[in-house]
Amino acid sequence: MAATTTASTITITTTSPSITFTAPNHHFLTNLRPFHHPNLHRHLRLRHTTCSYKVSIEHDGVTTNLEVDPDETILDKALETGMSVPHDCKLGVCMTCPAKLLTGDVDQTEGMLSDDVIERGYSLLCVSYPKSDCQIKIIPEEELLSLQLATADD
Ligand code: FES
């Protein structure tokens, strides 16, 4: 483990597991002497092991299980692992990557779905970042489009 400090940040880098943690160099952090804390390794390891979520995706009758980090979209992870998932813009605009969230929670604040549609459990996978373990079913684009248009009239 190595630690470097600047006037404004503290950076801690470990090699196994490989983690780089940068935090503001606030007065309280320096007073805690984090580099000498006996539980720092355990704390970093716990943060590392809880940083991805189990995401189960059902598509065309096949269920695929993924490990998705909270800072990557479910679509990007699915494509990276070789899944064939409908998509186009990857910006949360075209609605060609619709899914129904059966369990779990995602952050999709970058997308354009209405709050009503999101509350009914729908999501756009290209802007969905997991906030918990999730079960997701990819649905036909028409299902989401009709619902989005119906709620737009409300
Ligand atoms: S790919 Fe266009 S909205 Fe997701």
Image: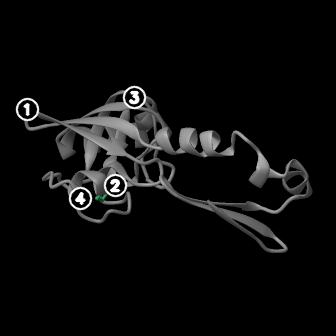
Q: Is residue 30 above or below residue 136?
A: below
Q: Earlier in the sequence, mark 4 or mark 1?
A: 1
Circle number at residue 61: 1
Asked whether, in this view, residue 55 is left or right of residue 62, the answer is right
**Location of residue 27 by image quarter:** bottom right
How far apart in space, not on screen, are marks 3 and 1 (Cα)?
Answer: 22 Å
Image location of residue 43, percent across then percent down: 63, 40
Q: Amino acid at mark 2?
A: Cys
Nearer to us in this view, 132 or 24: 24
**Of tags 4 and 1, which is closer to the observer?**
4
At 45% from the left and 30% from the top, the residue drawn is 119
Secondary structure type for disc 4: helix
List x then y, in percent, for residue 137: 23, 34
Whether residue 24 appears in this view of the structure is: yes
Kind of residue indicated by mark 1: Gly
* Residue under the image location 29 percent in, 34 percent down: 100
For mark 2, give the secondary structure: helix
Q: Which residue is mark 3?
A: 120
Is ligand 1 closer than 8 angstroms to the Cβ of mark 4?
no
Residue to which mark 2 is pinned:
126
Please report whichever mark, 3 or 4, sits nearer to the chain's N-terminal start: 4
Nearest-to-viewer mark from 3 and 1? 1
Residue assigned mark 4:
80
In this view, which residue lies farthest toward the left?
61
Q: Earlier in the sequence, mark 3 or mark 1?
A: 1
What distance separates the C-alpha of mark 1 from that of mark 2? Answer: 21 Å
Q: Are marks 4 and 2 in contact (CB under 8 Å)?
A: no
Name the residue located 30 percent from the left edge and 57 percent from the top edge.
76
Q: CA distance from mark 3 to mark 4?
A: 28 Å
